[in-house]
Image (tube, rainbow, N blue to C red):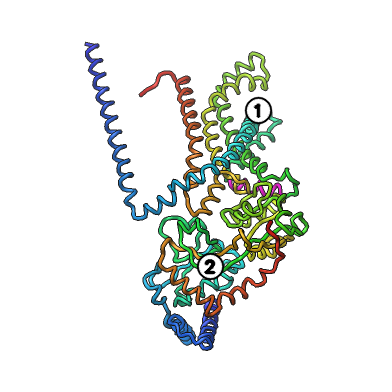
């Protein structure tokens, strides 16, 4: 009951925001009109008219009129707050609902499912329309799955204990003698082996929990993560640790770009890209969400790549 | 009369054998043909082929996987002696008969119960992160070290039970004879019971080794990059499962010879102990 009323309030808020934007932006996009309808209807009667996508998405979604979105199990902060994407809280949850709204799906028609990384890339039929859980866009992965345009770009960062040898490092040369840990199959692991090139082979874990246990047991000196996750992990998950620094994107070090994962060749990619480009250039919603969920997470000293 | 009936029987048996061979060949061909014909006609076979059987991906990953497999071999080689020594000691402890040693027997029984009852993967996590977490310094907090210890603890529980079964299988009369010859109970165990017991349990022990050889890969969960982890890294990097298939083949190249050896030893043991064989 309580949840329901919160949701209605959220929808009303969202609708108000959209109407406001439409008013000053003067956009007469079909999907926005649809969102407006949805908002107003929902405000007045609880079980009103619900929108089920726009012309672009027709016939392209898994379930007709519904948008099935997948995220990790569990989903981590600050990407999804409290492992509850339905709450729209957290950057990826907000982006997902933003994209859904741009494509004309009302919140009620967004269905969440959970998958691991492997489920997202296995060759069988997918149980989601798209999957977002900080998948980095790489050319190799494009052979097997399709990616949307990036919805977030970040740098790699190092987390270690404030009183450890890693603290105070200013260039990758200072990091060579350290033992690193990373999550398996992440671009962070590639970053360690290709850019930092430490003297000893890094240790690898299934999830951040493993890396954290190893850091606490002093089996490793530092973990490499994407910057927002690094801030979250150091502030909330590992007591006494801090973000030692971030590596700027320079020549030879590409920034990490997160994209949504689709079944290879899924035509829905076009619709999502269109929605993302509107959210980037027209409504600036992406920037708003970044400001709301990730802004506390981007100030860190820069470590020079040598 | 006898000679004609025996030659009749021989020719009948020959016909029966030929018939079995033909049926076996026909059914094998049918199954193979069905697989070869039907699988590529499945709607998403192309995608599966690309994801699991990509030759380029396989040859790209192969050297890295073989490299990583060395770590598995090393862990295997240094845990096996530990497993056998601890397992044997526990089995002997459980077989002591002095009343005063009851606590030892109880302890040994508890150890095997616990070690066999906890999933290996869980135990590796608990020991591999828990013990170093007590504040050990490098290199004594190495996940490789404590992962191996966890593996050795679990497997020594299994191996102890195998040894115990072997010891129990030696007839009580053997002990009685040895004791009546003036051997102490320790000497009886060492010179009479154990030599017979160990010979009998070699095949089941090898069976445990085959299983250990695969479980070594679980040590990767606490950090070290061995073949399973390397395959996982390549899988994630290329979004392709072929490295897993290659890793499976590398495992098979070791476990199949080991399994065949076990089978051979088993049948030799059966021949040795049970006289003639009934078809």
Q: What's drawn in magenta, residue-wise?
A: B121-132
Image quarter of the N terminus of chain B: top left
Q: Secondary structure at mark 1?
A: loop
- Dot 2 falls on which chain? A
Q: Which mark is residue A194?
A: none
Residue plotted at (66% across, 20% down): B187
Q: Is residue B267 above or below residue A191?
A: above
Residue nearest the observer in this picture, A139 or A108:
A139
Discs 1/2, front? 2
Q: Is residue A303 above or below residue A9?
A: above
Q: Which mark is residue A150?
A: 2
Give the total number of marks visible in the rendering.
2
Residue identifier under label 1? B97
Q: Secondary structure at mark 2?
A: loop
Say whether residue B130 is magenta.
yes
Residue A56 position, x and y percent, is 40, 74
């Amino acid at each position: 009951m309580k949840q329901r009323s919160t949701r209605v309030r959220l929808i009303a808020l969202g609708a108000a925001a959209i109407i406001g934007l439409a008013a000053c932006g003067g956009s007469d996009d079909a999907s926005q009109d649809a969102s407006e309808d949805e908002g107003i209807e929902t405000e007045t009667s609880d079980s009103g008219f619900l929108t089920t996508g726009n012309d672009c998405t027709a016939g392209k979604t898994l379930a007709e009129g519904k948008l099935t979105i997948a995220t990790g199990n569990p989903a981590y902060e600050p990407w999804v707050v409290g492992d509850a994407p339905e709450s729209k809280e957290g950057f990826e949850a907000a982006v997902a609902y933003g994209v859904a709204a741009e494509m004309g799906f009302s919140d009620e028609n967004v269905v969440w499912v959970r998958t691991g990384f492997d489920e997202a890339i296995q060759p069988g039929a997918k149980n989601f329309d798209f999957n977002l859980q900080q998948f980095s866009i790489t050319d190799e992965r494009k052979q097997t799955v399709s990616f949307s345009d990036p919805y977030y770009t970040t740098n790699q960062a190092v987390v270690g204990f404030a009183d450890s040898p890693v603290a105070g490092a200013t260039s990758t040369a200072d990091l060579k003698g350290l033992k690193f840990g990373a999550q398996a199959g992440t671009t962070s692991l590639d970053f360690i082996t290709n850019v930092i090139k430490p003297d000893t082979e890094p240790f690898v874990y299934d999830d951040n929990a493993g890396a954290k246990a190893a850091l606490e047991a002093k089996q490793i000196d530092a973990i490499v993560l994407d910057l927002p996750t690094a801030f979250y992990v150091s502030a909330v998950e590992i007591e006494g640790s801090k973000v030692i620094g971030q590596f700027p994107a320079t020549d030879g070090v590409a920034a990490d770009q997160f994209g949504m994962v689709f079944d290879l060749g899924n035509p829905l990619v076009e619709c999502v890209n269109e929605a993302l480009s509107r959210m980037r250039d027209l409504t600036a919603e992406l920037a708003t969400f970044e400001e709301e969920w990730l802004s506390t997470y981007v100030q860190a000293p820069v470590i020079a790549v040598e | 009369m006898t000679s004609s009936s025996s030659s009749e029987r021989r020719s009948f048996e020959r016909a029966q054998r030929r018939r079995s061979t033909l049926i076996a060949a026909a059914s094998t061909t049918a199954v193979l043909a069905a697989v070869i014909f039907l699988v590529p006609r499945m709607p998403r076979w192309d995608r599966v082929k690309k994801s699991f059987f990509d030759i380029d991906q396989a040859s790209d990953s192969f050297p890295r996987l073989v490299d990583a497999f060395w770590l598995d071999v090393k862990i295997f080689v240094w845990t096996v002696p530990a497993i056998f020594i601890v397992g044997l000691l526990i089995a002997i402890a459980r077989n002591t008969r002095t009343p005063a040693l009851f606590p030892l027997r109880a302890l040994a029984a508890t150890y095997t119960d616990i070690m066999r009852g906890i999933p290996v993967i869980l135990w590796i996590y608990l020991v591999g992160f828990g013990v170093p977490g007590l504040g050990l310094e490098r290199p004594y907090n190495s996940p490789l070290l404590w992962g191996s210890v966890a593996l050795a603890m679990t497997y020594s529980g299994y191996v102890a039970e195998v040894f115990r079964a072997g010891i129990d299988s030696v007839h009580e009369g053997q002990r009685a004879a040895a004791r009546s010859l003036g051997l102490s109970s320790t000497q009886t165990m060492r010179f009479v019971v154990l030599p017979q017991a160990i010979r009998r349990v070699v095949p089941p022990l090898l069976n445990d080794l085959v299983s250990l050889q695969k479980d070594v890969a679980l040590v990767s969960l606490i950090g070290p990059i061995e073949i399973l982890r390397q395959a996982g890294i390549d899988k994630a990097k290329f979004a392709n499962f072929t490295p897993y298939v290659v890793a499976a083949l590398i495992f098979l190249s070791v476990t199949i010879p080991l399994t065949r050896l076990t089978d051979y030893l088993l049948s030799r043991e059966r021949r040795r102990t049970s006289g003639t064989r009934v078809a």
